[in-house]
């Protein structure tokens, strides 16, 4: 596995953030995982830090995950951005794809999160 990575999780659900953070930290020891509960705080953290990965919920107050993801992609074109959502409408998936964002369906599981990051890391090597 490659060097430790940094991840920003953006979800208005504290439970969802804690769950996904625990999955990442147990599968990838040494990785840094930050949290934001909405687009404004996520944007501030993105302005102040460099992240390898952004994992963004779709349904949030203010900007939705697609809007925030588009902003992040412009600001950090070398970072990987994924939409983590229970909204599996094909239109949402197509919009995410058009913006260069990955799509991870909720509910998150240890296996799903580990497989996603392992595949991304393998393609980066």
Image (tube, rainbow, N blue to C red):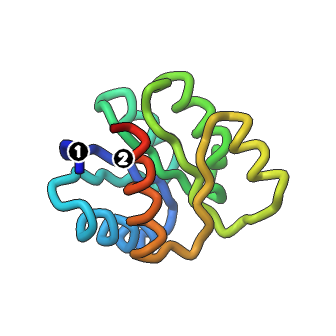
Classed neighbour count for the residue bearing mark 2: other residues with Cα under 10 Å, few (<14), some (14–19), many (≥20)? some
Tag 2 secondary structure: helix
Question: Where residue 60 sits in the image (x, y, percent)?
Answer: 61, 56
Tag 1 secondary structure: loop
Q: Residue at x 70, y 42 (%)?
A: 97
Q: Residue at x 48, y 51 (%)?
A: 55
The residue tagged 1 is 2
- Image quarter in which the C terminus is found: top left
Relative to 102, residue 124 above or below: above
Say whether residue 27 is left or right of residue 42: left
Relative to the observer, which residue lies in front, 64 or 90? 90
Q: Residue at x 52, y 32 (%)?
A: 72
Question: Where residue 8 sits in the image (x, y, percent)?
Answer: 37, 48
Q: Which mark is residue 122?
A: none
**What is the distance, in whole Å, between disc 1 and disc 2 at their CAs?**
7 Å
Q: Residue at x 24, y 70 (%)?
A: 26
Question: Where residue 122 sits in the image (x, y, percent)?
Answer: 38, 47
Count the marks: how many? 2
Q: Earlier in the sequence, mark 1 or mark 2?
A: 1
Q: Give residue 28's quadrant in the image.
A: bottom left
Q: Extreme left residue here?
A: 30
Say whether residue 109 is left or right of residue 89: left
Relative to the observer, which residue lies in front, 38 or 23? 23
Q: Give residue 45's quadrant in the image.
A: top left
The residue tagged 2 is 121
Mark 1 touches mark 2? (CB < 8 Å): yes
């Amino acid at each position: 596995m490659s060097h430790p990575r940094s991840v920003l999780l953006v979800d208005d659900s504290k439970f969802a953030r804690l769950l996904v953070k625990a999955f990442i930290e147990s599968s990838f020891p040494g990785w840094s995982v930050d949290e934001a509960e909405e687009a404004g705080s996520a944007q501030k953290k993105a302005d102040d830090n460099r992240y390898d990965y952004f994992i963004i919920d779709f349904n949030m107050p203010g900007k939705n995950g697609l809007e925030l993801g588009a902003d992040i992609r412009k600001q950090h074109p070398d970072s990987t951005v994924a939409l983590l959502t229970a909204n599996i409408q094909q239109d949402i998936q197509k919009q995410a794809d058009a913006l260069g964002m990955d799509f991870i369906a909720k509910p998150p599981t240890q296996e799903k999160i580990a497989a996603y990051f392992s595949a991304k890391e393998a393609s980066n090597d």
